[in-house]
Image (spheres, rainbow, N blue to C red):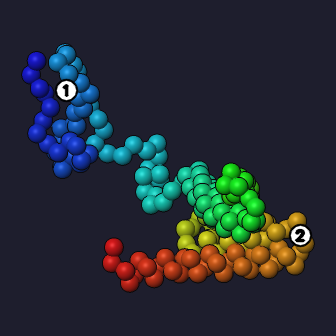
Amino acid sequence: MADHSSKRDTDSGFDHGSSQPRLYNPYKDLQVPYRNFQLPTSPEFLFDEEARRQRRSWGENLTFYTGCGYLAGAVAGASTGFVSGVKSFESGDTMKLRINRILNSSGHLGRLWGNRLGVIGLLYAGLESGFEAVRDTDDVWNCVAAGLGTGALYRAARGVRSAAVAGAIGGVVVGMAVTGKQMLKRYVPI
């Protein structure tokens, strides 16, 4: 059988302006009869509006922020639990008991912090996507308002004052994070 693949740069996924379709051969290393499959030369989107977007969708944001929040909380909580477990050692403890204290403390605080930060990420992603849909624009104010709303919603069960303070803290933290990101983009060549 003759190899029908072209000499274009098909591994990188770029078509480089040629009008020929990209060919994919899943059996190129095997000595069997095969068929080349045509791959699309442009990104696949259902609507043109999706192709013009330069950011993640609301579902991707939800998954990203929730997952990152849970992971960061679990690691920070486990680290704090490790320190707490080491500090709780007593002079007569065996090695098995010391390891048990560390594991129990790390697991407990890791779950606790992970769940808390995961919920905060979930609230933030939902509010940010909601503000973007309502305002029909993607700017810094959506992020700051989402941070403010996240803090207020997270502490709403503890009263109005606690919700207001947490909302202000959330807005300030997100504002500082967005400002830091813009400064990083401007002054640090990456």
**Residue 52 badge:** none
The residue where tag 2 is placed is: 158
Q: Which badge, 2 or 1, comes first in the chain's sequence?
A: 1
Specify few, some or many for label 2: CA neighbours under 10 Å numbering under 14, 14-19, or 20 or more.
few
The secondary element bearing badge 1 is classed as loop
Residue 10 x %, y %: 20, 42
Which residue appears farthest toward the right when viewing the image?
Answer: 159
Give above or below for 135 relative to 176.
Answer: above
Identify whether 83 is placed above or below 9.
below
| Left/right of residue 107 with respect to residue 49 in the rendered view | right
Which residue ends up furthest to the front in the rendered image? 92
Q: With 65 as the anchor, is 87 left or right in this view?
A: right
Measured in 3D between alpha carbons, the distance from the residue under mark 2 to the one under mark 1, in whole angstroms, is: 64 Å
Can I make out residue 111 in this image?
Answer: no
Residue 104 picture location, percent across and down: 73, 54
What kind of element bears circle 2?
A: helix
- Residue located beneath label 1 in the image: 29
**Quarter where residue 88 is shown:** bottom right
Please, is residue 55 above or below residue 176 in the view? above
